[in-house]
Amino acid sequence: MKLLPAVVALALLTGCEAAPSTPAPTTYELPPRQVRPDETALKLPPAKNGDTEFTLIGLAAGLPSITGSHAEMLPKGQYVRLRLVVTNTGTSSVLFDSKRQLLVDDQGATHPSDEQAMLIKRQPAQFDLGHSVRVEFDLYWDIPKDRKPVAMRAFGGPTITDMKNANGTDIRL
């Protein structure tokens, strides 16, 4: 009878060993998507402005027109489209204004996004970017035909530490 407690203890010790655990993934595995036919995929590191992180993922330059659900529009020069992902890395929400994002051309001129193109393509003008929220969308500009886009000047939005958000961050294309 003295052997029974030892056998029970041994059975409990060997039977209660934790199964080897696999570590949880540290990144989201997003499926790859096709690049649009008129677009070049960009492989640029993310850039920050305030509490907003910008990742530029696609570029289409020299677009001769854009078509929406109700209209086709010709540019004064050429349309440029950037596909981007914005992520709020701060602890508060950020009011993101797509109209503040500027395209810098090869002659150093800056261009605001084209309001009509953004409307036709149903892209957001302003939105509240919540804590840890990630949004992917397009920005459109109409620039002279003889210019080439070289950078986007990104403005993340007012933050607790920079209520004016006066200085943008240039992201080279």
Image (cartoon, rainbow, N blue to C red):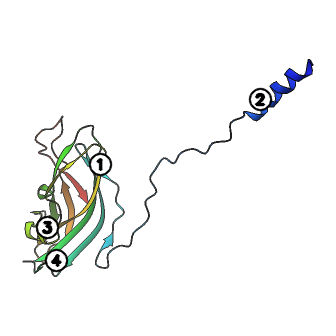
Amino acid type, callout 1: Val
Q: Nearer the viewer, mark 3 or mark 4?
A: 4
Residue 69 image label: 4
Residue 100's label in the rendered image is: none
Q: What percent of the width, then of the height, locates residue 94?
A: 19, 44
Q: Position of residue 146 (x, y in %)?
A: 13, 77
Give the numbered dot on residue 13: 2
**Label 1: which residue?**
133
Of circles 2 and 3, the one toward us is 2
Instruction: Please name the residue shown 33% across and 66% down the image.
Output: 42
Mark 2: which secondary structure?
Answer: helix
Can the viewer see residue 73?
Answer: no
> Residue 118 — which label?
3
- Give the mark, 3 or 1, whose residue is nearer the N terminus: 3
Name the residue furthest front.
1
Q: Earlier in the sequence, mark 2 or mark 1?
A: 2
Give the quarter of the image for residue 86.
bottom left
Give coordinates of residue 104: x percent, y percent. Answer: 16, 62
Q: Residues within 10 Å of mark 2 (few under 14, many from 20)?
A: few
| Secondary element at tag 1 | loop
